[in-house]
Amino acid sequence: MSDKADSHEVGPALDGTGAELKEDLVAEYNGYCVKCKDKRDFDGEVTETKTGMRMAKGKCPVCGTTVNRILGKA
C-alpha cells in the first residue's frame, strides 16, 4: 500500500512566469573572476538566456563577485 504523502514528484514550477523553462541545476564550474583576475571554481545555476544560450551563474568563492560562464546553445 502506498501513501500519497510519501510519494511526491519533484519537477519544475508551473506558475506561468516562465520559470519552468529554467534548468536550475547546481554544479561546480570554472570561470574567470574579473575582480580577482583569476580563474575560480564556483557553484552555479544553469539558466538559458533570451537568445537560447546556456549560462552558468554563481558567486566567486574568494570575493563574492558574480561569475558567469557561457556553456553554449541548448
Image (cartoon, rainbow, N blue to C red):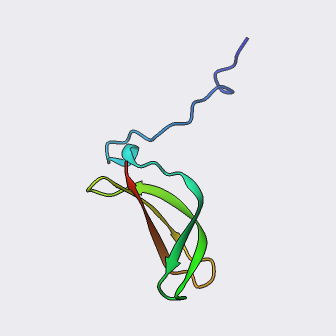
Question: Residue 72's x, y, as percent?
Answer: 39, 56
Vertical side of 73 occupied by 4: above or below? above
Residue 17 screen position, x and y as percent: 32, 48
Residue at the left extreme, as displayed: 51
Instruction: Give percent across and percent down for residue 53.
Output: 34, 56
Q: Residue at x 46, y 48 (%)?
A: 23
24 vs 39, nearest the viewer: 39
The image position of residue 11, as x and y in percent, is 51, 37
Task: Tell me: 12 left or right of 59.
Answer: left
Q: Residue at x 32, y 47 (%)?
A: 18
What's the residue at 37%, 45% (across, down)?
21
- Kindly indicate the quadrant of the structure image that contains residue 63: bottom right
Q: Is residue 53 above or below residue 67?
A: above
The correct choice, above or below, for 39 with respect to 24 in the image is below
| Image quadrant in which you'd find residue 10 | top right
Outermost residue to the top: 1
**Residue at 59% of width from left, 76% of height from top?**
40
